[in-house]
Amino acid sequence: MNALAALGGLRTVGLDELNARAELQTRVDRKYIVPARDLPAVLHALPTGSDVLEIGGENALRYASQYFDTPTLDSFYGAVRGRRRRFKVRARTYLDSGGSFLEVKTRGARAATVKDRVPVTGDELDDEAVAYATDLLADAGIPGAARLAERLQPTLVTRYRRATVLLPATPGGDPSRATIDTELTWIAADGAVLQLPSSVIVETKSGQRAGALDRALWRQGHRPAKVSKYGTGMAALHSDLPANPWHRALSRHFRHGTIARGIAPGTASVPA
């Protein structure tokens, strides 16, 4: 948590204000893998007028995401092969507030990410959730949407602590938001656990123009990285899977992580 200490000096905003100023469900995402030791300098470089999301008195909240894929890993291989009509399906749980949402991410025009979501109970896909995923996949033009949705099963869990920053508009642009994820953990379906304590994933979410945090990161020598929490996590935990799109991230950052095997999913030894 010390790495996020600089956020304590920012004005706080609630979720309603954050969404009103920069909801950005359709956006361009840029991801950066930053050494944890460099994060304080990045935060101190945030532009004047930056705010941090606070919920229940906390500005770094615990998240868990259960990713779903088919037995043949259609979602994973769609990312590996760079398919235009690729997708991700996950149940995201806000561990501090208890809310859960089923999220379906697809690719829109000009490489924009389109994310739709609906509240769910728990992290299992019931008939209603499968129907919802089917409709969204079909709307995105993904072939065989119904069969894909019906075959989805739990594949990978990610856990992390997230701070969300609202950044002022750049000249000619709109306000943008960014997320900063620490305490990164991946849990495979077989119980293998990967932890990455020395790295932080920063994700900027803006329109077509780069946001204020992108520019601050660039000035400090950090460049966007090819990384996917789902795809890179799967490749790191399963050496038999292809990893070409994320080779650089895996070799530079994930090799510093620790992997524990033989741990039953959901046990207390997995950080909550």
Image (spheres, rainbow, N blue to C red):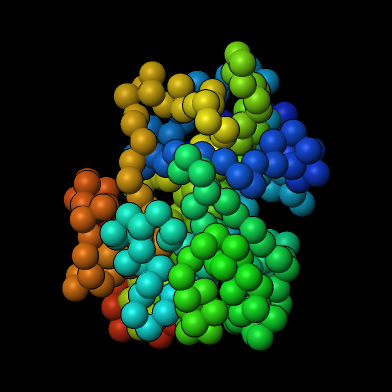
Can residue 272 be seen here? The reply is: no
Q: Position of residue 16 (x, y in %)?
A: 80, 44
Quadrant in the picture for residue 96: bottom right
| Front residue (pair 157, 20) | 20
| Front residue (pair 173, 49) | 173
**Is 63 left, or right, of 11 in this rendering?**
left
Q: Which residue is pictured at 21% across the width and 55% down the height? A: 244
Can residue 209 be seen here? The reply is: yes
**Is 124 left, or right, of 224 in this rendering?**
right
Q: Residue furthest top?
A: 171
Q: Is residue 87 above or below residue 169?
A: below
Quadrant in the picture for residue 218: top left
Q: Which residue is pictured at 34% across the width and 31% down the height? A: 223
Q: Position of residue 49 (x, y in %)?
A: 67, 20
Q: Which residue is pictured at 50% across the width and 26% down the height? A: 210
Q: Position of residue 115 (x, y in %)?
A: 60, 54
Q: Position of residue 231 (x, y in %)?
A: 35, 61
Q: How many marks?
A: 0
Q: Which residue is pictured at 27% across the width and 52% down the height? A: 246
